Image: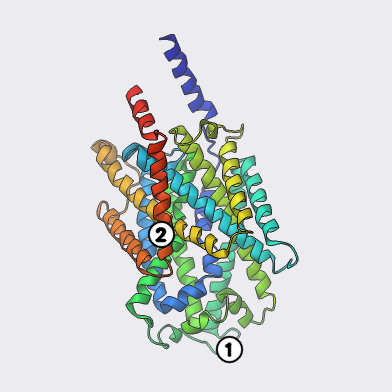
Amino acid sequence: MLNQTNSSTEQEIHQSDQHALKRHLKARHIRLMALGSTIGVGLFLGSGTAISQAGPSILLGYLFAGMIAFIVLRALGEMAVHNPVAGSFAQYAHEYVGPLAGYLMGWGYWFYWVIVGVAEVTAVGIYMGLWFPDTPQWIWALGSLALMGGLNFIAVRLFGEFEFWFALIKVVAIIALIGVGCGVIFLGLGNQGIPIGISNLWSHGGFFPTGLNGFLLSVQMAVFAYVGIEMIGLSAGETENPEKTIPIAIDSLIVRILVFYGGALFVILSIFPWNEVGQVGSPFVAMFERLGLREAAGIVNFVVVTAALSSCNAGIFSGGRLLFGLSLNSYAPKIMKKLSKSGVPTVAILTTVTVASLGAFLNYFVPEEAFLLVTAAVTFIGLMVWVGILSTQLMFRKKVPENVVKSLSYKSFIWPYGSWIALATIGFVLVLLGYQEQTRVGVYVGIPIISILIIVFYLFGLHRQQQHQGESK
């Protein structure tokens, strides 16, 4: 009896002191963190390829996908405001769906951010080659991981500050693109004062030049672009006044993303015929070069480097919090619970950085095709996380008492219809993922990864461990 009392006391001390994350992230940090995790290299350099596949209809694709992302975020926000905890949706899945769901959500999303981090620092190495062509690419990749990992070790507030400024650089670059583009379209800036207008949106084969297949492909690509936006939920446990901060961040974030993505693509498609965009390289570079700025390549290179560092920074932050949350449910080693005096999960972050470093270093040796296989799996896992969030929120509504539901200060969007529509849409996108030859590899790699995680869950007896814990409670 005495031992039970001592054990209970120790557990309370751990929860209240040793295992408590610090609420040091402010509203401006949260808004820019989530924005920065979504707007990245894909928009600055990859948008040309997306436009060449879908034409002007990609605008509608991003608008529709943005609404789905908003529904997912609101579903997550409802749970995060009600119970802002470490581990976010992985913890909610564990509590409201079951141990296996929480395990898969946590480890799957950790894998997602580790590989995203590897991809982004590899991109940094490629982009730095423009300025330092004689320096090996792997040095920049590992150096970037070490730098971002170091920032995450110090304090969550410092992480928030760096992420704020990284994301701000991207935002300023996009605003500059939209501003300059509107000047070209409506004022004839750089075109001898003759406005270009917006006729390019329909003058080259119509608004749907590649037909229904092209439009569906644009929806698919747009949904992929928004994956990562859900990381806002992981910050709830370290946010000052989450009941106020999270709703404001979610509601304003989706508007900003739609404006930035939609505005940038509108400008690009209005100025350049859609079938020429892929031939001019980066649309951002082409826009500045149109005004005679010879430094355009260097400017965009700087923006893209900061964009990649921002995503890597967010990945390390997310990976550390996920391992910390997984350890609280005994899905990860107990040592992952260890926090520094400033409330940083140091061991979990070190583990995330170490695994990502191995990936970045191995990328120097393995063929590019193998690396792309893993990256494709990330997209599949990201969409499965969205399915998990929506499914968890539906179960949350079923298991929480009716009086609690009525008292929720922040609720999901047009529940339950919004959640079901989003689930159906994501399911359709997953089918498209397997249908399109260039994205099918994500299914081939993603399903085995999830299968391996399930096998490990039962092979190591994690399901029995959770049953014992439930009985002891």
Residue 82 appears in the rendering: no
Q: Position of residue 157 (x, y in %)?
A: 60, 43
Amino acid type, mark 1: Gly
Q: Out of 88 and 256, give the one closest to the viewer.
A: 88
**Residue at x 40%, y 39% (from the top left corner):** 457
Determine whether 170 is above or below 339 in the image. below
Numbered label attached to residue 355: none
Mark 2: few/some/many CA within 10 Å (<14, 14-19, 20+): some
Q: Which residue does the numbered mark 2 point to in the structure image?
A: 444
Q: Position of residue 12 (x, y in %)?
A: 47, 22
Please tell me which residue is depicted at 34% across the width and 76% down the height of the picture: 213
Location of residue 258 with respect to 200 vertically, above or below = above
Residue that mark 1 sits on: 193
Task: Reply above or below: 353 against 39.
Answer: above
Q: Nearer the viewer, residue 159 or 119?
A: 119
Judging from the image, what secondary structure is the residue with disc 2 in?
helix
Question: Which amino acid lies under the numbered mark 2 shown in the image of this protein?
Answer: Tyr
> Which quadrant does the N terminus fall into?
top left
> Residue 292 appears in which quarter of the rendering?
bottom right
Color scheme of the displayed model: rainbow
